[in-house]
Amino acid sequence: MKNVIIYTTRTCVYCKMAKEYFIENNIEYEEKDVAIDSEASEEMIEKTGQLGVPVIDIDGEIIIGFDKEKIESIL
């Protein structure tokens, strides 16, 4: 099982889609809300240089946005 982290905000539609996809496919993930967790926000920016969400980290492979095909290819 791969380690999946998703950096999100509560208002992000694509974050919700990604989390629904993970739930529907029984993929365990850790969620980090960058709007309320400054440490998670800094971590996400350090990994990607990006401010936008979602950012999905699958065992160190970074996906920016909800890219189902890329997620499936990594998993």
Image (tube, rainbow, N blue to C red):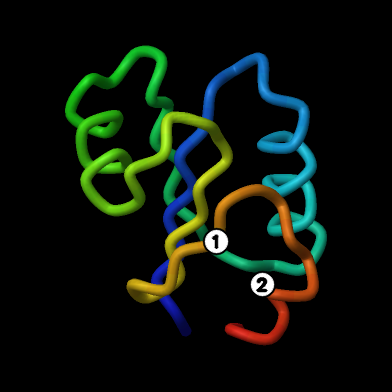
Above-or-below relation of 63 to 75: above
- Rendering coords of residue 53 (x, y %): 55, 35
Q: Nearer the viewer, residue 25 or 60?
A: 60
Residue 35 figure quarter:
top left
Residue 63 figure quarter:
bottom right
The residue depicted at 45 percent of the width and 64 percent of the height is 62
- Rendering coords of residue 68 (x, y %): 78, 65
Q: Is residue 47 left or right of residue 32?
A: left
The residue depicted at 42 percent of the width and 26 percent of the height is 33
Q: Nearer the viewer, residue 70 or 36?
A: 70
Q: Residues within 10 Å of mark 2 (few under 14, many from 20)?
A: some
Q: Residues within 10 Å of mark 1 (few under 14, many from 20)?
A: some
Element marked by disc 1: strand
Give the position of the C terminus as an image quadrant.
bottom right
Residue 34 figure quarter:
top left
The residue depicted at 41 percent of the width and 39 percent of the height is 50
Q: Nearer the viewer, mark 1 or mark 2?
A: 1
Element marked by disc 2: helix
Mark 1 highlights which residue? 63
- Amino acid, disc 1: Ile
How far apart are the two marked residues, 1 and 2, measured between alpha carbons? 8 Å
Mark 2 highlights which residue? 71
Above-or-below relation of 29 to 72: above
Above-or-below relation of 8 to 28: above
- Rendering coords of residue 4 (x, y %): 46, 64
Above-or-below relation of 53 to 35: below
The reply to whether callout 1 and callout 2 are in contact (CB within 8 Å) is: yes
- Rendering coords of residue 21 (x, y %): 78, 56
- Amino acid, disc 2: Ile
Q: Is residue 28 left or right of residue 15?
A: left
Of the numbered discs in the image, which one, if any, rests on residue 28? none
